[in-house]
Image (cartoon, helix red, strand yellow):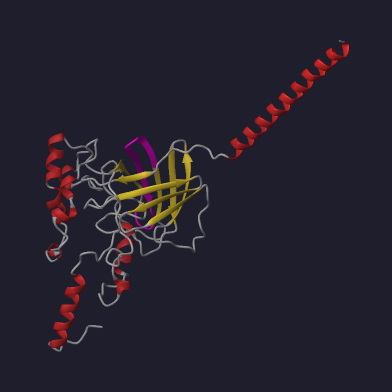
Amino acid sequence: MQYASIGNRKSVQWRRIGLGLAAATVMTSATLVAQRAPARQPDLQGTWDNATATPLVRPKPFADRSHFTREEADAFERDNYNRILSGFAAEDRLASDLNETYQETADLKVVDDLRTSLIVDPPDGQLPPPLPQVQARIDARPKRNYDDPETLTLDERCLMAVGSGSSSGAPPLVPNPFGQNLYQIVQTPDRVVIYAEMVHDARVNRLNGTHLPPSVRQWTGDSIGHWDADTLVVDTTNFRRETHYRNSGERLHVVERFTRTAPDTLRYQVTVEDPDTWAVPWTAAIPFKATASQIFEYACHEGSHTIEYFMRGARDEERRGVKPNR
């Protein structure tokens, strides 16, 4: 009986040791898994639309008003297409795609809080006055020559959408007045990619990285990001001089803040500064809404008769003996 008792006690001790080792193994494995697993990030993924009838800059009739009344907002939305059209030259209005049906401006609404401008700072809703050297920089650009693509705008060359006061692929993500403003956001633990409908640009934001050397310039700039609690903060520099958003220079610096405030809402706030363009920075707040719409390929010549007209005109000039202007 004594041997049996001792054997039982040893058996119990070995079982305890075994359980202890097993527990230690489980704890060690759990610790390793916890160390390997990335910190949980807010989910910004999805397809988003930032189209709005609210202009970036406060319109003159509302110069002293930060917000519309509901009645004023309704009237402003109804007149959106005519207001956009008034900004084009008469010959540009003849374009086949410059119509309300194609542009789908009828569905555009002002932002929910009825602000009269997307700009929230300066408080007057206006862009800061341009510095004196800006006009000199504009005058130094080569004059537009349709025989030389290098002189055309990035929009005309289908390289980037930075026309009509908007910017799609490159920050700041200011809406296009025609409503073509879809984005898809895809994220991993160390990257957040923002894919723009116009003009099919994909901007890769490196998380917790450092900027490239100043000598490396990119169409959409060099973007690095980090998480500030539930907000993704993206810092972008190193723009190419050709990008010149609203006549900005190479020292353009953009800081974006993306915050998911609801399952279908993304708050986007952006601060823009360029010591070669504006005396002070400016900030805009632009809501993004989740959408079930698909992003299709954006191609400048899809359904376009422009090339046909170019060729017809060239052949007509040849028949009349007109020499090409080169």
Q: Which image quadrant for residue 296? A: bottom left
Q: Residue furthest right?
A: 2
Residue beneath the point at 42% across and 51% down? 193
Q: Nearer the viewer, residue 295 or 275?
A: 295
**Chain part drawn in magenta:** 258-278
Is residue 257 in view? yes
Q: Nearer the viewer, residue 125 or 294?
A: 294
- Residue 24: horizontal and vertical position, in percent? 70, 29
In the displayed structure, 11 sits above or below 153; it is above
Q: Which image quadrant for residue 298? A: bottom left
Residue beneath the point at 41% across and 47% down? 186
Residue beneath the point at 24% across and 64% down? 302
- Residue 196: horizontal and vertical position, in percent? 34, 53
**In the rendered image, which quarter contains the C terminus?**
bottom left
Any magenta on residue 322? no
Which is the main secondary structure of the residues drawn in magenta? Answer: strand
In the displayed structure, 14 sits above or below 313; it is above
Q: On the picture, is 77 further left or further right than 156? A: left
